Image (tube, grey):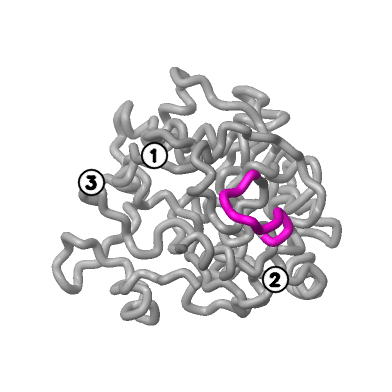
Amino acid sequence: MINRPLWIIFFGVLPITLFYCRRTAQPGQPWQVPDTAMIPHTAAGDDIRYGRALIAHTALYLGPQGSVAHISNGMNCQNCHLDAGTKVWGNNYNSTAATFPKFRARSGTIESIEKKVNDCFVRSLNGHALDSNSKELKAIIAYIQWLGKDLPKGYKTPGSGIRELPYLPVAADTGKGKIIFLQQCQRCHGADGSGQREANAAEYRYPPLWGPDSYNTGAGLYRLSRFAGYVKDNMPFGVNYLHPQLSDEDAWNVAAFVNSQPRPVKAFPADWPDIRTKPPDHPFGPYSDTFSEVQHKYGPFRPIVRQHKK
């Protein structure tokens, strides 16, 4: 089982206003997502607003029918980074500006925010990287930096990114996951996982979870722990971490079912140059341990963790 940080143990049930306090804030002064009404009416402010629009409606600008370029699969960044990347435990960007650049074991390098954004385009949007000098990449960076403008460098707010769920003692069950999917997920994502488009047909209201228009096998959500943590606190659509509808077991099982379905396959042979640093649930070898790819994909993960600790 992953050892969760102490703030989760002691503060995980407190109201959102206290849960989201800044380290530098005084008691009773919670850290909050900046109000978009406060974006300045300047050239810099225009970049921030454009960046937010690109996150919320990526497909309109950069999808198969995009007005700027055709470099992504038709999903919006917001389909995975909820509420334009601001929702607590919704795969948000709140601490991105404060914590990047940083070393990431997946690439074995110190990565910039630009690298993080383009990784999403290549992997989650199954497309192509934005040009480093493009107006669009600069605007997305401006928005992400604006979101974290009040955070001290190096500080990661509670509720950032995706929560880590405790590992199950057994392998995740795709059969049980299919039942959960049909009961809880198909009304938005379709029984075939193909999602549901907006009226304009150019973007998705509810994204495809598998198939040719979904994220590829190099995406972060293709790791079961990432998908399970995301589902637990955000799905069915509209729930939050304070009022989840799925149990931890349900979240792991539905993640296993979804990630067992066909999707674009894209290899990234340069990932994890030090194979000893691969997460237990990274589904592709080689590994520094003796466990199979199947166990690395579906679990149980605790034996893998124990061997790594040795």
SS at circle 2 = loop
Q: Is residue 283 left or right of residue 19?
A: right
Q: Earlier in the sequence, mark 3 or mark 2?
A: 3
Q: Main secondary structure of the magenta part?
A: loop
Closer to the observer: label 1 or label 3? 3
64 up-or-down from 97: above or below: above
Instruction: Determine the image quadrant of residue 44.
Output: top left
Extreme residue in the left direction:
26
Residue beneath label 3, please?
A: 153
Closer to the observer: label 2 or label 1? 2
The kind of residue tagged 3 is Lys
Task: Measure the alpha-carbon separation of dots 1 and 3.
Answer: 17 Å
Closer to the observer: label 3 or label 2? 2
Residue beneath label 2, please?
A: 171
Q: Which mark is residue 143?
A: 1
Circle 3: is it few (<14), some (14-19), or many (20+) Cα within 10 Å? some
Residue 119, image x, y percentages? 54, 35
State the extent of the magenta-drawn residues as a range: 286-295
Instruction: Determine the image quadrant of residue 121.
Output: top right
Q: Which residue appears at 70% of the width and 56% of the height?
A: 292
Task: Measure the alpha-carbon separation of dots 2 and 1.
Answer: 40 Å
Circle 2: is it few (<14), some (14-19), or many (20+) Cα within 10 Å? some
Residue 32, image x, y percentages? 31, 60
Q: Could you tell me if residue 238 is visible in this image?
A: no
Q: Earlier in the sequence, mark 1 or mark 3?
A: 1
Q: Which residue appears at 61% of the width and 50% of the height?
A: 79
Extreme residue in the right direction:
192
